[in-house]
Amino acid sequence: MALQFELDVDLDRILQEKFTNEFRKGYVTVNGVCLPKRYEEFAKAIEEFEVRDDDVWVCSFPKTGTTWTQEMIWCIANNMDLEGAKVPLPERFPFLEHSILFDYTTIIPRHPEVHLHQLVSDSVSYASSKTSPRFIKTHLPFRLLPRQLRTGEKQPKILYVARDPKDTCVSYYHHCRLLEGYRGDFNSFCRLFLGAKVCFAPFWDHVLGFWNRRSYPNVLFLKYEDMKSDLTSVIRRSATFLGNTMSEDQVKMLLEHLSFENMKSNPSVNYEEAVEMNRKLKLIDVDGDFIRSGKVNQWQGEMAEDVVDRFDRETKEQLSSQDFVF
C-alpha cells in the first residue's frame, strides 16, 4: 500500500508540474476518473442534461478515432451532404464537455456566426441548444454520462469507438503536446496513462463500460483497427445501425471523403484554428497537426520495450475475463 501511495504521489507531481498551466489549474478524481478541476462547475449540468431519443452520440476515449467516426456518422445520417459537411465539425457535432478542459474561456473572442464563445465557454448549453436530430460527442466514461442516458430513460443512438491502448497513448501524447500544453517527455506521459492520471482515464474501464453494453439495441461498438482494415464494412454496419441506406456510389464517395489525405487537409475537421489559437496564447511551442498519423501499430516506433510490456500486462489483466481483443 505504501508503494502504491508513493507511486500516486509521484504521478500527481508529474501531472502538476508538466500538465497544468494558467489555462488548466488542476485535476480532480470523480468516481475514479481523472478530470480537469473545471469539471466541478459543469458536473450538475452534465448529469441533468436533457437527452433526446433521436440524438446520435459518438463516445470514446480521446485519440481513438473520434473525429474520423464523427465525420463518418454525420455524413451517413445526412445523406452525404458534403456541402453541409463544410461547416466546422464542432458546430455540427458539438463536444459535450469541451468547457471542462480549459480555464481560458473569458478571453475567447465572440464570433456571432459560429457561436465560438458559447461553444467553448458553455459547451453543455451549446449542445443542448442544437435542433434535432442532434449529434453529440463525448469522452466521458459511461458512469459519468447524463443520467437519462445511463438509466435508459432515453434511448439515443450510441456509437463507441475503441483503439489499441498503446497506439492511443502515442496519439494522446502528441495531442496533449499540441493542444493541452503538456511539457513532459513521452516516458512520463506513458506513466501517467498507465496510472490513470490523464484526462478521462482509466482507459480500460472506459472501454469496458461500453463493451459490456454492446448488446443493447441502441449501442454500436466499433474498433479503430476495423475502420483501418475494412472501412467499407464499418460504413455499412453504421448505416444499418442508423437506419440509413447507402448506394454503392455514396459509399465510394464517403470512402474518398474519409481518406487520411482528405481528412488531414479538410479545415472543417482538422482544428487548425484551435492549434493556432493555442500558439497565440503561448500554450504550446511545438509544431504539428491535429490529424497526425492515423497509423495502426505506430507504438512500434516510439515505445520502449519495457513500456510495451507494461501495457501488454495491463491489457491482459484488465481483459482476462472479457471476450474482447483490440
Image (tube, rainbow, N blue to C red):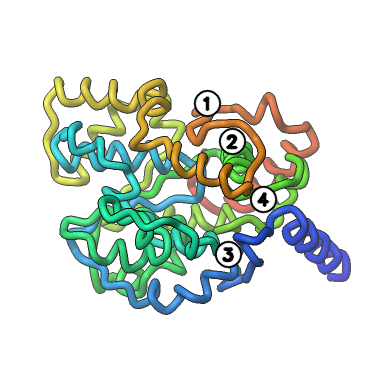
Q: Position of 163 compared to 187: left or right?
A: left
Residue depicted at 82% across the width and 69% down the height: 5
Q: Position of 203 compared to 144: left or right?
A: right
- Give amino acid for label 3: Leu
* Contact check, label 3 and label 4, Cβ < 8 Å: no
| Circle nearer the N terminus (3, 4) | 3
In the displayed structure, 324 sits above or below 257; it is below
Give the camera-side residue of 309 and 44.
44
Kindly indicate the quadrant of the structure image that contains residue 16: bottom right
Residue at which label 4 appears = 193
Give the camera-side residue of 264 and 59.
264
Q: Does residue 219 appear anywhere in the picture?
A: no
Residue at which label 3 appears = 35
- Give amino acid for label 2: Asp
Residue at which label 1 appears = 295
Query: Real-space Cα distance between discs 3 and 2?
Result: 21 Å
Query: Real-space Cα distance between discs 4 and 1?
Result: 20 Å
* Residue 218 on image: x %, y %: 25, 56
* Residue 88 on image: x %, y %: 31, 42
At label 1, counting other C-alpha atoms closer than 10 Å, the crowd grade (few under 14, some 14-19, many 20 or more) is: few
Query: Real-space Cα distance between discs 1 and 2?
Result: 8 Å
Kindly indicate the quadrant of the structure image that contains residue 21: bottom right
* Residue 68 on image: x %, y %: 38, 36
Residue at which label 2 appears = 167
- Give amino acid for label 4: Phe
| Circle nearer the N terminus (4, 1) | 4
At label 2, counting other C-alpha atoms closer than 10 Å, the crowd grade (few under 14, some 14-19, many 20 or more) is: many
- Give amino acid for label 1: Lys
Between disc 3 and disc 4, the foreground one is 3
